[in-house]
Image (tube, rainbow, N blue to C red):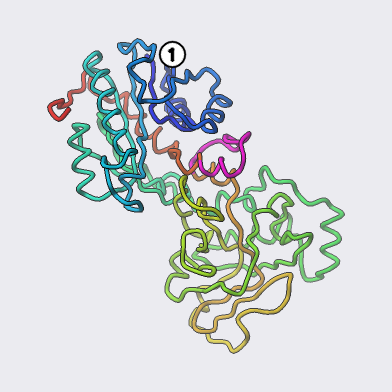
Amino acid sequence: MNVLSLFDGISCGQVALQRAGIQYSKYYASEIDKYAIQVTQKNHPNTIQMGDINNWREWDIDWSEIGILLAGFPCQAWSLAGKQRGDNDPRGELVHVLIDLFKHIKQINPNLIFLFENVKMKREFLDYIDRLFGCKHIMIDSALVSAQNRKRVYWTNIKGIELPQDKGILLKHIIHENTNQDMAPLSEKEIQYMKRGNEKWQQAGKCRLDRYLQYKENKSFTVTANIYKGVPYNCFFQDLAEYIVPFDKTLKILDKEVQEGKVGYFRKDSQANRVYYIHNKAVTLCGDSGGGAAKMGQYLFGCITPDRVDKRQNWPRFNHGTKFYTLTAQDKHGILIEGYIRKLTPIECERLQTLPDDYTKGISKTQRYKCLGNGWTVDVISHILNCINNKPKETQIDLTNF
């Protein structure tokens, strides 16, 4: 059996097939992004790249041997976050190219297994695409199997699919501070230097932040954030320095959302400027979005204590130091004592998509974030593919809408 993956991206489908234990002879991929192709060929050098889907009639493929068809067709034209022009958008028109190719293979191989994916969209679009594909969509949130909120819609003829069991993974479970993986630790000399500067600080085995991260229900151990060469020493890793977000006094702490995951925002309430807890799910990774932290979000590594949000204090909201800052519970906003805010690293974003660490290594960080934002959550796809063994010998599908 061979596999054809359209809009293949970084070949998350190939990782999912392997996790589901599904063997295949050849994996054909249609992708035009050179960075995504680079990631795919690094991890799966036997992948056969076919190029632009618009040229599918010219491809040298034995269609009768295609047993599985995968496609995460472009979402921008359908997404609730976009202009919602559907197939009136050039990117949306590609769904009809997919339909033509799908129909062509299906007529040659009636037992073709297919799995298509896109973002959450308005009901009108969902009903329309249901008719195009001849099956009812299902919606699965990646939050069930990862630390990321990511609702996605799937169309497939694989039978018996149920929602994955919730693994209870939160962002705090996969961050570097809590996993101590793939980051360069501070040297013993640097640690001793910093300890002399703060007698109250104790290493506590690895890092005080580890103890803070273990608290349940957002109860937080107070952490310190004295800066050594620009790095809060309780994060314990030199390599995180570039991800620390420079702090300024425009940070607005929100009244009602603090306990629900969103802490506040810098300057204006936009995707790139929002700050979230690490005690909840990460926000959805984005591929085509702006700069800054727009693709991955920025997160508070510090101590806002929800049990004190109703406690008023008269102290200034911010201190004037350069090494750390303090937010008080003025205006019932909770309290942050000596914390720091940072963006997620590419490795952490790979973990949000349940990919292996460093899967996207080899391209720029900007391109890594983009590729990951456009990718699939692997464990959702493998969960669906695991149901193939339970499928009927011949799957029927209504082709009248094609």
Q: Please say whether residue 264 is visible from this viewpoint.
A: no
Residue 274, x across and y down, in percent: 50, 63
Horizontal and vertical percent position of residue 115: 32, 30
- Foreground residue among 236 and 62: 62
Please state which of residues 269 and 86 is positioned toward the viewer in this rendering.
Answer: 86
Q: Is residue 397 left or right of residue 153?
A: left
Judging depth in this view, the residue of 85 and 30 nearest the camera is: 85
Question: For the point 56% across and 35% down, which residue is it?
Answer: 356
Secondary structure that dominates the magenta span: loop
Whole-percent x and y of residue 140?
33, 44
**In this view, 95 is above or below 216:** above
Is residue 369 within the magenta segment? yes
Q: Residue 8 vs residue 327: left or right?
A: left
Q: Which residues are magenta?
A: 353-370
Asked if residue 109 shows in the view, the reply is yes
Q: Can you say whether 46 is above or below 43 in the image?
A: above
Q: Which residue is mark 1?
A: 25
Where is the N terminus found, in terms of image quarters? top left
Using the rendered view, name the quadrant where residue 230 is placed.
Answer: bottom right
